[in-house]
Image (tube, rainbow, N blue to C red):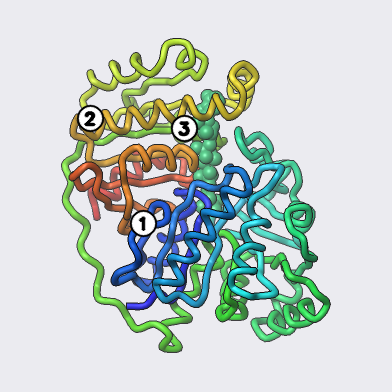
Amino acid sequence: MKTVLGCIADDFTGATDLAGLLARSGVQVSLRIGVPSDPPSDPSAFEVIALKSRTAPVAEAVAETRAALKWLKAAGAQRFFWKYCSTFDSTPEGNIGPVAEALMADLGTDQTIYCPAFPENGRSIFMGNLFVGQQLLAESPMKDHPLTPMRDSNLMRLLAPQVTRSVGLADRLTVAQGAEALRNKLAQLKAEGIAHVVVDAVANSDLEVIAEACRDMPLMTGGSAVAMPLPALYLADGTLSADAPKAKAPRLSPETIVLSGSCSAMTNRQVADYMRRGAPAFQLDPLALAENGAQEALDWLAEQDLTAAPLIYATATPEKVKAAQAKLGIAAAGEIVEATLSACAVAARDAGARRVIVAGGETSGAVTKALGVSQLDVGAEIAPGVPWTYCQSDGHQIALTLKSGNFGAETFFTDAQKILEAA
Ligand SMILES: Nc1ncnc2c1ncn2[C@@H]1O[C@H](COP(=O)(O)OP(=O)(O)O)[C@@H](O)[C@H]1O
Ligand SMILES: O=C(O)[C@@H](O)C(=O)COP(=O)(O)O
């Protein structure tokens, strides 16, 4: 089969988010960790390549994304999707714009759209301003993100310094008039030399209009939700034929490990909820880790009954995160936590854990790499944008879920376990 849509995500939770939303329509979605070293053989209609490039130096992010594009082109794809965070997370240098411009140059296209909206998770865009629930992005807890604090809510202002060509807006008033009106607006903006168009969306119905209007663009960019309508559009016009039914979820033994490196407001609530329910839990302190290493955590883990699904977490309040970063540096504090959680993941797997729940995008990238996972099949959705996936790790089949910091209900860690039981 030829790939119909080639997708590249800038982090691993983002990649499973996108793969999960595409798979809602019943199509097969293949998710690969990093650019495969082998050329494509029998690729899926929807291929998602997960990179860990969100906070990488710009040149590195651009080079990796171009390599992913090349692989997806070899898989037969003619349309591409660049997935970044629904809260438009980027460092001050910013990878979203340079990556988009590099992809546009490689694809020989003059215009793309930017739509991080994800209404089911409360992300909406109005007049180019991104909201998280009822708050502007820069007034939401994203202002305190440990690696990518978001201090402006206006997508045009965030994007403009990251790109060389002009930025414009197709606002909600246009989107509300339907796909043809949006296509006309995009054409008008293109004639004015606008290469980068932020598109407003506040509801799933807006995303359907945008997907319909932009489905044949060589490159679309956004959060996962604007890609969600694409499989149904491609099935309806015969670009894609209906897939064989999906394989049943494998039965895996109940040993479980929960690892949380996200410090988002939602993950803080999820960790507290899980502990209130009596889950065994071990807290990592970056300062203690810097001094004494990971052994204490590994010793604690070795004593746990993994059928009780123990939790190891570095999740902390913004004040505690800032204090650790002030002493260790932002990158070093993050790295030491990621390395420890990765070591715990490997130790838990070696001790028999076959169900692995990870919270945090960067954290998920580190843990997935440590587990040596290269390809994931998408399973049941636990919460909007967070599916279970199945993969191989060191010769064992495991279920792995990678939760974006902000996603999931307060009961996420127990929800995940219940959904796997029912799958
Ligand atoms: N207590 C802490 N102090 C400092 N940094 C931390 C702490 N706990 C986690 N981190 C780091 O914060 C970052 C959180 O990012 P990430 O895993 O992407 O979560 P999210 O999905 O919420 O963005 C990671 O690099 C993680 O290692
Ligand atoms: O689009 C989203 O919000 C997510 O898919 C995502 O990218 C989340 O990133 P993290 O919060 O760093 O997990």
Residue 261 numbered tag: 3
Real-space Cα separation, disc 1 to disc 3, in angstroms: 29 Å
- The tag earlier along the polypeptide, 2 or 3, is 3
Callout 2: 10 Å neighbours few (<14), some, many (20+)?
Answer: many
Q: Name the residue under label 1.
A: 37
What residue type is disc 1 on?
Ser
| Mark 1 or 3, closer to the camera | 1
Residue designated by label 2: 306
- Return the x and y of residue 45 as percentages of the image width and height: 37, 73
Residue 53, compared with residue 21, is above or below; it is above
| Residue pictured at 69% horizontal, 73% vertical | 111
The circle on residue 211 is none
Depth order, front residue of 390/172: 390
Residue 316 in view, yes or no:
no
283 above or below 413? above
Q: What percent of the width, then of the height, locates residue 206? A: 62, 71
Look at the numbered discs 1 and 3 and tell me whether their residues touch, using CB distance below 8 Å: no
Q: Which residue is drawn at 69% across and 38% down?
A: 143
235 left or right of 62 in image: left
Which quadrant of the figure has residue 345? top left
**Quadrant occupied by the N terminus:** bottom left
Q: Residue furthest right?
A: 192
| Ligand 1 closer than 8 Å to label 3 CB | yes
- Please tell me whether residue 280 is drawn above or below residue 408 in the rendered image: above
Question: SS class of the residue under badge 1?
Answer: loop
Disc 2 vs disc 1: Cβ atoms closer than 8 Å? no
What is the secondary structure assignment of the residue under circle 3?
loop
